[in-house]
Image (tube, rainbow, N blue to C red):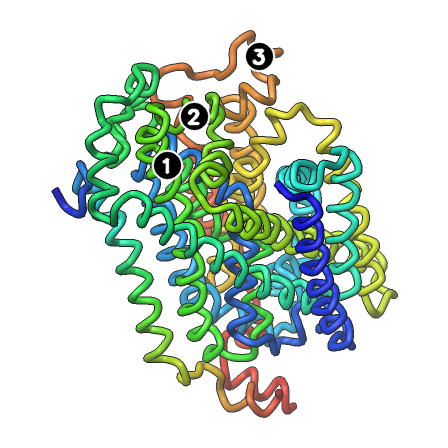
């Protein structure tokens, strides 16, 4: 019985919430300064 | 509860809201500032505002109560909200929405789709769908907020409705989207602080994470027979496969709300408020943490309330809430949490209602003023005044609808709006960003198919809405046309969205390809450079 849950699917949902948030946090930090703005957009701005 | 203390807290809170709204007003100098924040909104503000607009009071109290009733299987919903509503939405939809929106100088969601397919009629159609259906959803949130003010301040409900609607209208009208987003960011911080405190105190009360879950698992034998019949298999287990509750959880909540969020105009417009992809990367981080800290926590606490109530009163949560799932979270907080926290949670709920409502009425106003009025009266150069009038009309329509419609229809407003938006807009929105072969006629067919099939499903097939609307009952003497299980419980998105996508593909392939020069302008960096410099 994982983290006290009766059903592996619910334990998975609990962990999946934490995991996908961790992915978003790592992505946000890793690509903190990565940009998709091209030269022309930058100039226009 | 000390009404004077709470009143003082709310007054101080509203003073900060007024100050931020004034800041938005001072920073708004143009129509672009008013509608999309001049494309230069801070990523933290954007992400908090996106999340705060997404998570309303009903997500915390309503869905938290559903988790109290049915258990933690509902945790797949915040997973979908984060994986689809943040990660996919920001990276797969957000980036091209921002880029194409800027290239075409679009200021609203209807304008983006209309300009991408070179059709003022498509813009008008999308704006009309928003203006027609959004007041029903706005009505739900407005009523929730007014009920909160009524109870907290001991005010008459009618006054509470007018005061709540009036305060929000004022800061949206003057502050524009900058005012809305600044205030949303503050409200979001209050929500996160309130919810994290709630989770920590709940786990502490119940003896830690695993002990609390285990205690909930051990209550499996207490599931009432009426719920077990619907598929309830315990609060830490998924519902029984192919049961009524399984279909509701998977088709309506996970797919309907999870995927439905992708095509919400009030959320999509936020992608156009940031200046580059860098801001979207940063917003992914903040947005995911926000959804986890609000929706994720509400569902865990809602389910765990069963353990607390059972230990203290020998009842499960729904019994302690007198059979009303909406009361599970408020009753739990009132009974189990320190009194000071009750005030913090009151502000959390007020924040959730205000942030969602302000975003909705801003989009409703811009659809009415900028997309409809300005398209029909093109001589008007700046749409700010028309949008402000649209905001006032939208809030009046929401209040009138809240009074006119029966309560059971208003309660289904979120599902109706999400269902129609997802089916009508999602295929067209995806095609606008990624499929160059999509044509104007294909988009017309897709929006019409999605909206009509959704409406048909809501009126004649999906029991929750068809029963509340009563049209099928009046015409055919029964709540839904197909009573064979599982059809009355299959959400309209399951068939309306694929049909709308099919209509888009079939009609697009059968009609002449779009103008190559226009596609160059939308997608090609070289053409964009020439276009701007030439």
What residue did someone put label 1 on? B305
What residue did someone put label 3 on? B473
Tell me the quarter of the image containing the C terminus of chain B.
bottom right
Q: Earlier in the sequence, mark 2 or mark 3?
A: 2
Q: Chain of mark 3?
A: B
B176 or B223: which is nearer to us? Answer: B223
The image shows residue B171, relative to residue B533, as above or below, that is above
Residue B414, position in %: x, y? 56, 39
On the picture, is B22 further left or further right than B249? right
Same subunit, labels 3 and 1: the answer reads yes
Check whether the beta carbons of the residues at disc 2 and disc 3 lie within 8 A of each other: no
Q: How many callouts does the rendering have? A: 3
Q: Residue at x 47, y 26 (%)?
A: B321
On the picture, is A5 further left or further right than B81? left
For residue B219, say whether it is visible: yes
On the picture, is B22 further left or further right than B440? right
What residue did someone put label 2 on? B320
Instruction: Decide: few, some or many residues near mark 2? Use Cα within 10 Å; few <14, some 14-19, many ≥20.
Output: many
Residue B189, position in %: x, y? 53, 63
Same subunit, labels 2 and 3: the answer reads yes
Check whether the beta carbons of the residues at disc 1 and disc 2 lie within 8 A of each other: yes
B262 or B79: which is nearer to us? Answer: B79
B253 or B172: which is nearer to us? Answer: B172
For residue B134, say whether it is visible: no
SS for dot 2 = helix
Tell me where residue B29 sits by quadrant: bottom right
Tell me the quarter of the image containing the N terminus of chain B.
top right
The image shows residue A27, relative to residue B237, as above or below, that is below
Tell me where residue B136 sits by quadrant: top right
């Amino acid at each position: 019985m994982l983290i006290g849950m009766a059903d592996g699917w619910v334990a998975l949902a609990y962990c999946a919430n934490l995991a996908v948030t961790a992915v978003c946090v790592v992505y946000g930090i890793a690509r903190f300064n990565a940009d998709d703005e091209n030269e022309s957009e930058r100039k226009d701005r | 509860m000390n009404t004077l203390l709470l009143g003082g807290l709310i007054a101080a809170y509203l003073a900060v809201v007024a100050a931020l709204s004034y800041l938005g007003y001072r920073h708004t100098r143009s129509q672009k500032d008013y509608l999309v924040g001049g494309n230069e909104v801070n990523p933290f503000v954007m992400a908090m505002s996106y999340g705060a607009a997404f998570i309303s009071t009903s997500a915390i109290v309503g869905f938290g109560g559903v988790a109290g009733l049915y258990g933690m299987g509902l945790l797949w919903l915040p997973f979908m909200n984060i994986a689809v509503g943040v990660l996919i939405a920001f990276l797969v939809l957000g980036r091209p929405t921002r880029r194409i929106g800027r290239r075409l100088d679009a200021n609203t969601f209807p304008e983006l789709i209309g300009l991408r397919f070179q059709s003022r009629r498509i813009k008008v159609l999308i704006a009309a769908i928003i203006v027609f259906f959004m007041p029903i959803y706005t009505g739900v949130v407005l009523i929730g907020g007014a009920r909160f003010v009524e109870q907290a301040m001991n005010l008459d409900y009618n006054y509470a409705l007018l005061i709540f609607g009036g305060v929000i209208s004022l800061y949206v009208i003057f502050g524009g989207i900058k005012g809305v987003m600044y205030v949303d960011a503050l409200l979001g911080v209050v929500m996160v602080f309130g919810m994290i405190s709630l989770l920590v105190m709940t786990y502490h009360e119940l003896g830690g994470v695993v002990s609390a879950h285990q205690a909930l698992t051990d209550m499996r034998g207490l599931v009432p027979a009426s719920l077990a019949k619907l598929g309830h298999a315990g609060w830490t287990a998924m519902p029984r496969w192919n049961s009524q509750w399984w279909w509701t959880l998977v088709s309506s909540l996970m797919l309907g709300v999870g995927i439905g969020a992708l095509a919400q105009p009030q959320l999509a417009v936020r992608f156009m408020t940031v200046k580059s992809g860098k801001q979207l990367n940063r917003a992914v981080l903040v947005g995911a943490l926000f959804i986890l800290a609000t929706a994720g926590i509400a569902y865990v606490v809602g389910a765990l309330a069963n353990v607390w109530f059972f230990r203290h009163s020998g009842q499960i949560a729904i019994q302690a809430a007198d059979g009303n799932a909406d009361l599970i979270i408020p009753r739990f907080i009132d009974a189990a949490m320190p009194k000071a926290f009750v005030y913090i949670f009151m502000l959390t709920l007020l924040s959730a209602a205000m942030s969602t409502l302000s975003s909705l009425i801003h989009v409703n106003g811009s659809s009415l003023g900028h997309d409809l009025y300005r398209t029909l009266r093109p001589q008007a150069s700046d749409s700010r005044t028309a949008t402000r009038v649209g905001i006032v009309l939208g809030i009046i329509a929401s209040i009138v609808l809240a009074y006119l419609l029966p309560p059971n229809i208003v309660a289904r407003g979120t599902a109706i709006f999400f269902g129609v938006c997802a089916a009508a807009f999602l295929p067209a929105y995806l095609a606008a960003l990624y499929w160059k072969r999509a044509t104007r006629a294909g988009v017309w067919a897709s929006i019409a198919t999605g909206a009509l099939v959704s409406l048909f499903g809501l009126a004649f097939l999906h029991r929750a809405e068809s029963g509340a609307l009563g049209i099928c009952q009046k015409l055919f003497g029964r709540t839904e046309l197909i009573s064979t299980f599982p059809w009355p419980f299959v959400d309209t998105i399951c068939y309306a969205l694929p049909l709308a996508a099919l209509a888009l593909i079939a009609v697009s392939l059968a009609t002449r390809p779009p103008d190559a020069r226009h596609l160059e302008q939308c997608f090609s960096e070289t053409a964009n450079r020439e276009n701007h410099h030439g």
